[in-house]
Amino acid sequence: MTALPMPARYHTIILPQAASDLTEICTRIEQDSPQNAALVAQRLLDAIDSLELLPHRYKVHEHRTDPTKRVHSMPVSSFIIYYRIDDASTTVRVLHVRHGVRRQPRHFR
């Protein structure tokens, strides 16, 4: 019996705008419920960490001819995490974290 190869493990980077989004989300939740802010933050960070394996499993949000410019979106509770995958460097770059009812980014840099 032959063992299947392990999928590549990706390095996850939270870009400054996504870090700012996370801080803003937690600050807003903390005003009404400090304990929930910590739970939401942990859930979002765990979801981001899960992108280390099989980041392609979530849908492509924005198609581009250059695969490194495609944006994927991962739903997490009522939030959406937007990210790009660079297979050459096995890197996932988290671009934004938004609440699902907010207007989603029109363009990604």
Image (cartoon, rainbow, N blue to C red):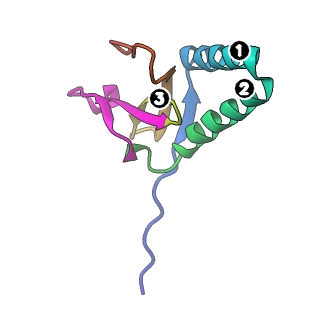
Q: Secondary structure at mark 2?
A: helix
CA–CA distance in space, label 1 to label 2 = 7 Å
CA–CA distance in space, label 1 to label 3 = 17 Å
Tell me the kind of residue under disc 2.
Ala
Residue 35 in the image: state x and y as whole percent: 79, 29
Q: Is residue 97 above or below residue 73?
A: above
**Residue at x 47%, y 29% (from the top left corner):** 80
Q: Secondary structure at mark 3?
A: strand
Q: Quadrant of residue 32?
A: top right
Locate the C terminus by quadrant: top left
Crowd rating for badge 3 (residues with CA inside 10 Å; few <14, some 14–19, many 20+): many
Residue 94 in the image: state x and y as whole percent: 51, 27
Tell me the kind of residue under disc 3.
Ile
Q: Quadrant of residue 14?
A: top right
Residue 66 within the segment the image draws in magenta: yes
Crowd rating for badge 2 (residues with CA inside 10 Å; few <14, some 14–19, many 20+): some
Tell me the kind of residue under disc 1.
Thr
Mark 1 and mark 2 residues within 8 Å of each other at the beta carbon: yes
The residue labelled by disc 3 is 80
Q: Is residue 95 left or right of 33 when viewed as pictured?
A: left
The residue labelled by disc 1 is 27
Whichever of labels 1 and 2 marks the residue nearer the N terminus, that label is: 1
Q: Please report the bounds of the magenta region as a residue range.
A: 57-75
**Residue at x 45%, y 38% (from the top left corner):** 89
Whichever of labels 1 and 3 marks the residue nearer the N terminus, that label is: 1
CA–CA distance in space, label 2 to label 3 = 16 Å
